[in-house]
Image (cartoon, rainbow, N blue to C red):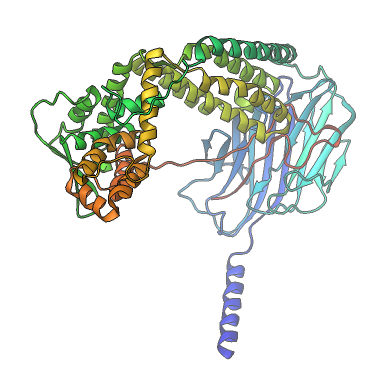
Amino acid sequence: MIKRLAVFLSLCFFAAISAAAFPAEEIEEFRSSALIRADASAQITETIVVRASGRQIRRGIFRVLPYEGLSSYEIISVLRDGKAEPFHTEDDFSHITVYMGDSSTFLSPGRYEYQISYIAKDVVRFQKDFDEFYWNVTGNEWQFPIQKASFRVTLPPGADIVPGGISYYTGLPGAKGQDAAFMPRHLSFSTTRSLKQREGLTVSVAWNKGAVKEPLWIKIFSVFTIFGKCVLFLLWVLLLIYYVRTWRRVGKDPSPRVIRRFEPPEGLSPAQVRYLQKQKADEKTLSVVMMSLMQKGVLRVEKEPNGDFLLAKISLPADPSLSSEEQAGLRALFRAGEKISVSSKYASSFQSADGAVRGALEKWAGKRFFSHNGVYNVPTYLFLLFALFVGIVSNGRMWQNYFSLPFLFALFAFVAFCVMLSLVRGCLFHIVGRVILFAILMLFLRACLTLSAGSFGVFILISLLPGFLFYYLIPAYTPQGRGYMDEIEGFLEYLKVAEKNRVFASNPTDAARIYCNYLPYAVALDVENKWWNALTAELGEAAAAQLVASSSTISAGDLGRFVGSVHSARHTPSSSRSGSGSSRSRSSSGFGGRGHSGGGSGGGGGGGW
């Protein structure tokens, strides 16, 4: 008991010493002013008085300025105690951070006054009956409490406050507290209590229209928004009619006629069977090719001491039984030698083999067996582009409300890459589909982040549901492809059978031979487990395992891990980082008490560095 009390007193003593040596850091005063200009921008001057002790404020402070309902910032000056202070900025897709101070100069504990001046462009919000400056004065993301905050607004000539045009809010984001005083004579605001961490001051000032020149693009877009939504609904109705008629004409498959088969479709390799069933070459196709090469004795698999798989090429005369994709994959995989480990160390070889297999399958199939009918999806893509455009102009400029310029540039580069890839590989349907899905996810994210755009975003998502359905229904088999699919589905039923004496002959040797011959097809059709169950039902698990171990194929226990290893071997290890940001609609308003703390443009926060 005495020891515990001594430890507790020691901790309290060291805590007291630390508190004395490093007192709490805070913002003693946050003074801000805004000069509204006739071009819809505002010159902001912020004076931030901090008490530094060396805990977080070591070199200086930083100020985070988010792109909330405005297009850009222009930093004019940064001062410390009335003298020019070095600074640098970091521009992210959602905000710009201004670091005040020199990275090589450390501050002594004390009181410092920082002043930052900047221009926030396109900050005025043009509502139907008034213009508004809705501004998050302090921001809600400061690392320190703010003892006192004040704000003063200077309006342009000819601007008069409209009735109910003054609103102010304090507290956490979303709060509607009004712990502040308003001085009409100077059009200024001042908090009546200190602000804790993540608490802030937000102000809304509304005046008569005409004092600030409304950009022409806003007038045009406001007219187009109503017209665009009407056209959007009409286009959606026409799309529904188009989907039904087009699917009936080109999207319906020939009538199926499944026939029970006890052997694979004649002339089709395992990879070709999978390609026809999936209508594409996917992540598992390369593994299917390797399983087929093992079964034909061209490839041998060994297990290394560390558990990895080692592939060895067996030199044989030209084998006419090898399909085109098997020959292409074999050549690409073993260009560097006769043995290769199934690991990311040889990622380039596996990527090359995967590309060769895909290319050979696409060339083999051509348009003989099925068609994606991608050209019939063009109306869906055009509708989406038009819908995105209407959504964008409904809430302001694209780069200030939806995405920033760097993000738009990255998105454009991604789309351009997909288009170029489609020209080279001829897979426009799948590539464009992924781009469209990516764009829809971005729109959905935007809808979730703002209430004002949410209803429109939900409308777009619902209206695109028929397009998604059409996307998956419009691909169709040709009569020749449907005939092959009838045989594939009949053979698939045979592979699924796991009852004793229904699959294999009574001779164990025949059972092992049939199992090994058909195993690549079972892997191709994703029924390898059921196929293994069929063998064990015939011979018993121990006898089946012994027969498989003596054959050239891979054991049932390692099959799943082998397929996974081949998939992983195509990808080199990589790292990534991600960030997060938020945005709110330009059309939102703080007028008449409809706003809240943290609303409007501006905001952000800051801290010490």
For residue 109, above or below residue 478: below
Q: Residue furthest bottom?
A: 2
Q: Which residue appears at 78% of the width and 40% of the height?
A: 596
Q: Residue furthest right?
A: 163
Percent coordinates x, y for residue 42 in the rendering: 70, 28
Percent coordinates x, y for residue 41 in the rendering: 69, 25
The mark total stands at: 0
Residue 575: image quadrant is: top left
Percent coordinates x, y for residue 181 in the rendering: 86, 45
Instruction: Judge from the rendering whether residue 55 lies leftward or rightward of residue 137; answer left or right.
Output: left
Percent coordinates x, y for residue 37 in the rendering: 73, 23
Name the quarter where the N terminus is drawn.
bottom right
Nearer-the-camera pick, 39 or 393: 393
Q: Which residue appears at 19% of the width and 30% of the height?
A: 330
For residue 605, above or below residue 259: below
Residue 245: image quadrant is: top right
Residue 606 visible? The answer is yes
Nearer-the-camera pick, 500 or 440: 500
Nearer-the-camera pick, 239 or 317: 317
Instruction: Judge from the rendering whether residue 82 lies leftward or rightward of residue 168; answer left or right.
Output: left
Instruction: Judge from the rendering whether residue 164 lies leftward or rightward of residue 65; answer left or right.
Output: right
Residue 457: image quadrant is: top right
Nearer-the-camera pick, 260 or 444: 260
Q: Which residue appears at 66% of the width and 35% of the height?
A: 449
Instruction: Judge from the rendering whether residue 287 lies leftward or rightward of residue 436; answer left or right.
Output: left
For residue 179, above or below residue 460: below
Residue 221 visible? The answer is no
